[in-house]
Image (cartoon, helix red, strand yellow):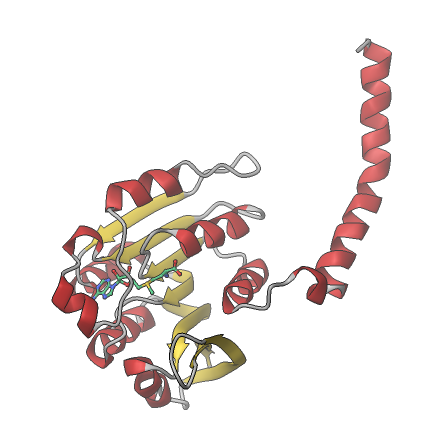
Amino acid sequence: MTKPQAAAKEILKSLLRPFYRMGRKFIFEKLPPLYREGTRYDLIADEIKKVKPGVIVEIGTCHGNNAERMIRTALWSNDVDYYGFDLFEEMARETFVKETSIWPAPMALVESRLKSIRLRGRTPKVHLFKGDTTRTLKAAVQRIGRADFIFIDGGHSYETVRADWENSERLCGPDTVVLIDDYPNWGVGRLVDEIDRGRWKVEIIEPGDYFYHSSPPLNCKLARVTVKR
Ligand SMILES: C[S@@+](CC[C@H](N)C(=O)[O-])C[C@H]1O[C@@H](n2cnc3c(N)ncnc32)[C@H](O)[C@@H]1O
C-alpha cells in the first residue's frame, strides 16, 4: 500500500468509527434479546460493564471460566486486578460432597490461562489463593483492601458461605457490588435471607437459571448485595 493509500484508509476509518460505535451501542443497549443467552452469567457480564471494576474478587475460581469472562469484560474498559480463591488441588472427596461442589482444575493451569489474557493492550494482574476460603480469604482481606466487584460462588455449605460473606463484607466500600450465586439452594438461601437488610440492599435476580437434571428442576438465582444508601 502506498503512503497516500494508507492515509486515505486511516481517514476513511476515522469517518466510519462514529457509525460503528452507534451501531454497536444500538445492538448492545436496544436489542438485548438478540444477543443475550439469558443466563445469569450474562447478568454478571452486564454488571461488570456497569461497575467497571478495577478490583474483582471471585470466591470459587474453579476452572477459570467465569473468571476469564469477568476479566475480559472488565479489561474492555480498564485495567483489572483479579483475586481468585479456590481449594484447587486441595479439594477432597469429603469436601466435594459437603460443599455440593464442582471439581476444580489445578491452580497452575488456571493461573497460566488467566495470565495469558490480552485485550485492548491490557493484561490482568492475577492473584490466586489455594485452600479453604474460611482461612485464605480471611488472611487476604487486608492485602486486597477494597474490592469493586465480588462474586461469591465457592463452597455451598451454610458455614462456608457465611464465612465467605462475612469476609467479603470487609472488602466492601460504598459502591461495591456483591453477587452471590445459587440462591436459594443449600446454605446460600439461609445466608442470603439472614443478611442484615438495615445495612444492605439485597435484590434477588429473577427468574434465574433452571437445571433439569433433578426433579423438581434446580433453580439458581443471583443475589445482588450493595450497601444501603
Ligand atoms: C461452582 S464452582 C465455581 C465456578 C466458578 N465460579 C465459575 O463460574 O466458573 C465452586 C468452586 O468452589 C470451590 N470450593 C468449594 N468449597 C470451597 C472452600 N471451602 N474453599 C475454597 N474453595 C471452595 C470448589 O473447588 C469449586 O471450584
Instruction: Measuring from the top left, give residue 53's x and y in whole percent.
Output: 49, 57
The tally of labels here is 0
Q: On the rendering, which quadrant does ligand 1 occupy?
A: bottom left
Q: Is residue 11 left or right of residue 75?
A: right
Q: Is any atom of residue 37 visible in this view?
A: yes
Q: Is residue 225 left or right of residue 89?
A: right
Q: Which residue appears at 40% of the width and 74% of the height?
A: 213
Q: Which residue appears at 54% of the width and 65% of the height?
A: 47
The image quarter containing residue 195 is bottom left
Instruction: Measuring from the top left, give residue 77's x and y in whole percent.
Output: 58, 48
The image quarter containing residue 207 is bottom right
Q: Is any atom of residue 229 visible in this view?
A: no
Q: Is residue 95 above or below residue 118?
A: below
Q: Is residue 225 left or right of residue 106?
A: right
Instruction: Measuring from the top left, give residue 138's x and y in whole percent.
Output: 20, 65
- Image quadrant where one finds the N terminus: top right
- Of residue 119 and residue 101, the one placed in the foreground of this image is 101
